[in-house]
Amino acid sequence: MVEFGRYYIGFLREVFSIIGAFFKGLFDLFGVLFSSDLSQLFENFIISSTRFGLLDWVMAIIVFIVNLIFFGVIIIKCIQLLRKYIKFSKQEIEKDELVKEIAILNDKVVELLDEKNKILALKVSNLGINPNELNELEEVDSEIDSNGRFVKLIKVDRLYPDGKILTVIKQDDMISLKDLVSRFINFSASKLGLYYNRKIISAFFSGMSASKTMILEGISGTGKTSLPYAMGKFFGHDAHIVAVQPSWRDRAEMMGYLNEFTKKFNETDFLKAIYETTYRDDISIVVLDEMNLARVEYYFAEMLSLLEIPDHDQWFIDIVSDTIPGDPKNLINGKILLPQNVWFVGTANKDDSTFIITDKVYDRATPIEINTKSEYIDAQPTEGIKVPYEYLNELFRTAYKEHKMSLEATEKLEKLDQFITKNFKVTFGNRIMKQIRSFVPVYVACGNTEYEALDYMVARKIFRKFEGLNLPFLQDEISDLSKLLNKLFGKNQMEECQNYLTQIKKTF
């Protein structure tokens, strides 16, 4: 044992001496590199350079730059490799930590399930629930879990077990557009205590014929939200009021999204509202309350583009990538076909707390301004009506035939368009002209004149675009436009337009 001990001590001395010699040699190498030998290299270069000619110096500089680049590239590559290694090591460490956390969570889930079973067993023993009743409770739980990804939409399916509800119209409800306006005004006043003048209600129904999207704007407290609410009560199908949040940035905030972790779809009230319309054929109104609290062109852009498609059978809203067992009945290949009986009404306040609604939105919607409260109306008790969408659409089609915009009005509108395009660089556009041709006949059928309809639409669809112009430099053009309106349509005919131009002049 003594001999082995001597041998082992000698062995350790040799090992440590070898290690010490290695590090000593390494330090000697760096000492030689950065001391006399390195300085000797520079001295040799200086001595040799005294014999350099012009071409030698050029060659020396080129070689020096190439060497510098070469060593720089090597250093950069080494740094990059080192960073990749550090990043890779960090990711592996994080993965290991996540795996450990998942394992801990799984253990906790098992513990919770055991605890649940113990509590359930305790209830069975204390309350005297027999095994059959326990099985029934488990079946109810499994039924709830089998709702799949869409809980709210499945509830809608259960509300309509027999499929789509068809509205049966009564003889007393078969009325004209003019009587429809009067009946709504009386219904709203007598049943709801809400008062509206004929002009606003005529514009609302005319706006429904011109576009599937309307914007009710004006100062706060003038009844913007209550108007579509009253319309829902009037048609016997309550309007769905969805409060827009300032955090809305894209369609997922409004429509919902599939949670990849839970595999459940985060449904919104907006999605539920439009899904329910697939089961109905009456008038359905979805209200985006205070729609300009967020940027409308962000979260509502997809809907605006969808509603522009001429073929209504292509109005599919993408919800999920595909359909699986347990999904809602009217979800077709992960999409919902938006029916024709739904309108979107947005309310907008004009103040510092809201965003400006862009032309992209205005051009596709029918704007209605409500800046004053209507006077009290002493109306007799009046009931609402229940009509299918097709009946209201037939009233619109009849108005298009019987009150088609006259050739005289069309020619005057074209002259006005030419003047505005030349002097203000603002044009009516095909979309706006199509809306005007749909709006005017219905507005006339509601008991108004053709020029009143043109006045209403031109002031809100065209003159509103002047807000983006440098108006102080267009004083003469604005005065000429006012004169042209009087010349084309007659004095006191285009009051809305003239009032708008007067307000512009006051800002000069």
Image (cartoon, rainbow, N blue to C red):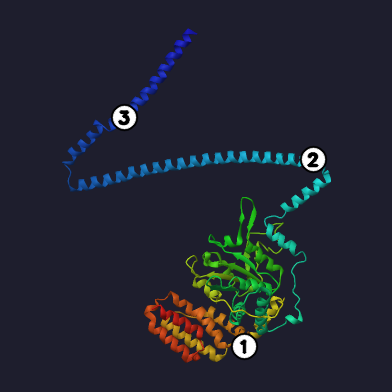
Please identify the quadrant where the C terminus is shown: bottom left
Q: Nearer the viewer, residue 327 or 461?
A: 461
Q: Give the labeled residue for mark 2.
A: 126
**Farthest residue, direction top:** 2
The vertical placement of 253 against 209, above or below, is above
Q: What is the C-alpha distance between the residues marked 2 and 3?
A: 84 Å
Please identify the quarter of the rendering in which residue 388 is found: bottom right
Q: Residues within 10 Å of mark 1 (few under 14, many from 20)?
A: some
Q: Give the labeled residue for mark 1.
A: 403
Q: What is the C-alpha distance between the residues marked 2 and 1?
A: 77 Å
Does the image show residue 47? yes
Mark 2 or mark 3: whose residue is earlier in sequence? 3
Mark 2 or mark 1: whose residue is earlier in sequence? 2
Q: Position of residue 347 (x, y in %)?
A: 56, 70
| Res. 323 mark | none
Look at discs 2 and 3 and give the one toward the viewer: 2
Residue contact at pointers 2 and 3, CB within 8 angstroms:
no
Q: Amino acid at mark 2?
A: Asn
Q: Give the labeled residue for mark 3.
A: 29
Q: Report whether 352 appears left or right of 133.
A: left
Q: Nearer the viewer, residue 422 or 357?
A: 357
Look at discs 2 and 1 and give the one toward the viewer: 2
Q: Position of residue 483 (x, y in %)?
A: 44, 89
Q: Position of residue 342 (x, y in %)?
A: 65, 71
Q: Amino acid at mark 3?
A: Leu
Q: Amino acid at mark 1?
A: His
Please tell me whether mark 2 sits on a helix, a strand or a loop: helix
Mark 3 or mark 1: whose residue is earlier in sequence? 3
Q: What is the C-alpha distance between the residues marked 3 and 1?
A: 102 Å
Please tell me whether mark 3 sits on a helix, a strand or a loop: helix
